[in-house]
Image (tube, rainbow, N blue to C red):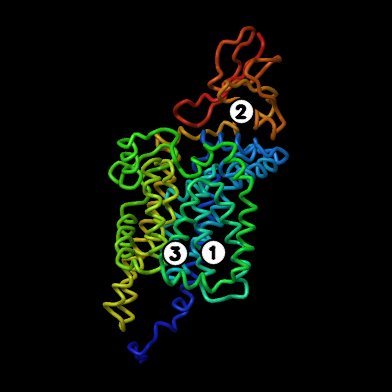
Amino acid sequence: MTNMGKYKISELFLYRWRYWFGYSVVAIGLIAILVFAGLYAPGGISAQEMQSVVKSSSINFTDFNSFAITNLPYHALQQLSITVFGVSILGIKLPSIILAFLSAIGMILLLGNWFKPRIAVLASLIAITTGQFIFIAQDGTPAILYLFWPMLLILLASIISRKPTRFRMFFKIAFCIVAGLSLYTPLSIYVLIALISAIILHPHLRFLIRQLSKPKIIFALVIALLLIVPLAISIIKTPSLGLTLLGVPSQWPDFNANFAALGAEYLGFVKPGGTTIMTPFFELGSMLIVAIGAYYMIRTRETAKSYVIGLWILCLIPVVIFNPNFTSITYLPLVILLASGLNTLLGHWYRLFPRNPYARIGGLIPVVILVAVLVTSGIDRYADGYRYDPRIAPNFSNDLQLIPKYTETIVVTNNENDFYQVAAKYNKTYSVSTTPAGDSFLATRNAKQSYSGYRIEKVITSQKSDQSDRFYLYTKR
């Protein structure tokens, strides 16, 4: 008979390949989520996405003044996307989907660099199935950059701080390029401030910086400065652009309303809701783990990681208080705290049973159940909320898909004109006007009225229960 007491669990096939299996599950889940979010839920575009398309189309690479916009790299990418795929759901959302995929991969690498592989797998699964991540992954606005730039900056900084590698110069240049481009996005400067402050305050980080080649650092910084020249000139011409990049609101905020919004965003577990972004930020179970991670960060505040995350959060707290619309910027630090909380829970359990492999595996069972519940509830809540919640679903329009192929003219209101003009510019199948013309035309729901000499021949509807009349086909009497 085999002596089970002497049997080594490390010899099991699944045990030896557990991390590859875990990362494969995360990769498959990520791809499935991005496809699902991009094509199925919410299945339309919001008013903010329409504004993003208008801003993207305004970029003229022969006109330097057109660069005076925030999130210039994203809008340039979105302009390329709608040039190739037209003003469609795919063309509008594709840049965000691509950046979300890269952000998720980078986030997994970052967590794997800061924590043990098992923690990286579990935390990544929870992170990519939260409603916040799924939403910004398909949202055709620059919101994904609030995750993409900080993730890339911290990941590259972590790689540079490790032992010398053959490609360290490449990572230095990459860091400076990313730093320069990130400054076009509001609030990105704060992660740079946190990194620089941590280097100044933490002795180990100061030591690492002294070991780097000064001429190579200067060369990389020159590249970054060249990248932000257009931004600097734009800020000189339009000072309000600089305030926007710092997250400074245009008028004095209503703090009571702001605190109420933040409470719903982070602690609204009893009454979840939202408009375009679903609240609360994380499920109750996830937020409890985040709280444990925050406590552990305070306990280990002498580490370089705690310095960076702590200083970054301190920079962001006043920003989100003054402007709750920027809460997406807190997603990555919360994910890192989530991973820290999971690491603390498993670490305490393993210290109780340092030599008992069965107890160690047994401790994983409730954690795996918790993660499974958080993952399934997060996906389910997102799918149901963005498809059926009467407070959320009406904020997304699939009107572009309802326009008949034979349409020659679309009559719109003045408020709709900018977006539909862009759609007509890239799709080139119809013209747009605010006044009727020709023997027939299609009018949007907001442009519906009595037009002299015309009658309504057909109403084009959507599947939604409210405001389902989307277009009206007018013909001459």
Q: Is residue 175 left or right of residue 193?
A: right
Compare marks 3 and 2 and give the one earlier in the sequence. 3
- Name which residue lies at 47% across and 55% down: 191
Picture disc at residue 156: 1
Q: Position of residue 131 (x, y in %)?
A: 43, 48
Task: Determine the secondary structure under disc 3.
Answer: helix
Considering the image in quadrants, where does the N terminus appear? Answer: bottom left
- Which of 52 and 280 lies nearest the eye of the viewer? 52
Q: Is residue 112 left or right of residue 5?
A: right
Q: Amino acid at mark 3?
A: Ile
Contact between marks 2 and 1 (CB within 8 A): the answer is no
Q: Is residue 460 above or below residue 42?
A: above
Tell me the distance, in whole angstroms, between the alpha carbons under discs 3 and 2: 48 Å
- Which of 347 and 466 lies nearest the eye of the viewer? 347
- Name which residue lies at 49% across and 43% down: 41
Q: Position of residue 55 (x, y in %)?
A: 60, 36
Q: Is residue 82 above or below residue 225?
A: above
Compare marks 3 and 1 and give the one earlier in the sequence. 1
Task: Determine the secondary structure under disc 2.
Answer: helix
State the residue position of label 3. Answer: 200
- Which of 408 and 139 lies nearest the eye of the viewer? 139
Q: Is residue 354 above or below residue 270?
A: below
Q: Amino acid at mark 1?
A: Leu
> From the viewer's perspective, is the residue at label 2 or at label 1 nearer?
1
- Name which residue lies at 59% across and 14% down: 456
Q: Position of residue 315 (x, y in %)?
A: 40, 52
State the residue position of label 2. Answer: 418
Tell me the distance, in whole angstroms, between the alpha carbons under discs 3 and 1: 18 Å
